[in-house]
Image: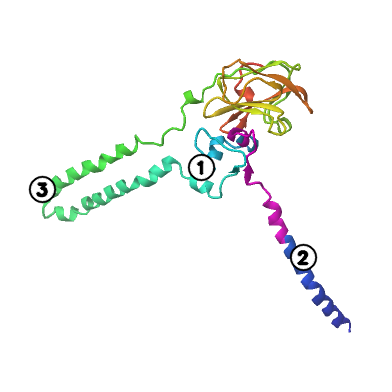
Amino acid sequence: MGLAVRRLYKLFWLPIIVLGLYGCGQMQPMGSSTRMIHYTVKPGDTLYSISWRYGYDHRQVAGWNNIRSPYTIYAGQTLRIIPPRDHQVRSGPTPAERAAVSRPAPSSTASTSASPRTSPPSQQQSTPPRQTTQAQPQAQPTQRPAPQSTPRPAPSPRSAATAKVDWQWPTRGEQKYRFNQNGKKGLGIGGSLGQAIHAAADGEVVYSGSGLIGYGNLLIIKHNDIYLSAYGHNRRLLVEEGTQVKRGQKIAEMGESNRDGVILHFEIRRDGTPVNPTGYLPGSGS
């Protein structure tokens, strides 16, 4: 009887255990797929502010959504905010690699045309004068394509002149936190309430508002195709989107953060990636 009871026990509990394990296996993918893929545009959003929020370059987000310059978006529009699944596959080969893949064909044809040159030695014994006169003209075409492949490397992305920006400190004060300190993506510059905030370089204001959580009243300035700068926790914003500003121009007044007190949060991003501002700003900011 004891053995029969144990068998019945196993038959009763085994389906329940299997179902429980299956349920756990189903829940894990659901939990891992909660990453937001799309974002619905809200009033006041710009492509720059949305890209900034999710840590991508605005041109990447524009490309994923087939949006062309000047990157106009509309409230209620749905945007993809992470790369498509095939994004890495498409962007894998560089222009140089594509050129290298497309160019070996001429060299392979040159090698095939060279193969008849190597095979005739057996015929040279019967007609040596003809083979020598034919071998020399064939050697010249095979050497000409070679120089054509070297002058055509992949075009350089952007010149140093394009990347050059004449930076200055946006305001003066004690650095309350450094780049990457406690996960900070910029510098915290302390001061007094209402203190003047200046544009760190020439550029265009591409965002002016308070829609990004954690930044308070925020300005984002585009300096060129590579660099953006941001100024957060302002008491008052003095410039609107689309305004062209000059280096040193007053653009805002310092406000305060609930966590860090009276402060300016300042960021520089290169191609959408936060970089340490102290590597770009002259001297010391204090």
Secondary structure, mark 3, is helix
- Residue count near mark 1 (Cα–Cα under 10 Å), binned few <14, some 14–19, many ≥20: few
The type of residue carrying mark 3 is Pro
In percent of width and height, residue 90 lies at 49, 47
In which quadrant of the rendered view does residue 191 lie?
top right
Q: Nearer the viewer, residue 133 or 282?
A: 282
Q: Left or right of 34: which side holds 163?
A: left
Residue holding disc 1: 66
> Label 3 belongs to which residue?
129
- Residue type, numbered disc 1: Asn
The x, y position of residue 237, in whole percent, is 67, 22
The residue closer to the viewer here, 188 or 210, is 210
Residue 191 left/right relative to 75: right
Task: Give whichever of discs 2 and 1 has the lower sequence position.
Answer: 2
Q: Nearer the viewer, mark 2 or mark 1?
A: 1
The quarter holding residue 139 reads top left
Q: Which residue is mark 2?
A: 20
Magenta residue check for 229: no
Does 5 appear above or below 182? Answer: below
Quadrant of the frame with the C terminus: top right
Say how the picture is coloured.
rainbow
Against 129, residue 50 (above or below) is above
Comes first in the chain, label 3 or label 1:
1
Q: Earlier in the sequence, mark 3 or mark 2?
A: 2
Looking at the picture, how far across and down is residue 36, in whole percent?
A: 66, 46
Residue 26 as seen in the image, left or right of residue 96: right
The one nearer the camera, 256 or 265, is: 256
Placement of the N terminus among the 4 image quadrants: bottom right
Alpha carbon distance from label 3 to label 2: 88 Å
Q: Give the extent of the magenta segment.
A: 25-50
| Of labels 3 and 1, the one closer to you | 1
For label 2, count other residues whose C-alpha is less than 10 Å away and answer few (under 14), some (14-19) or many (20+): few
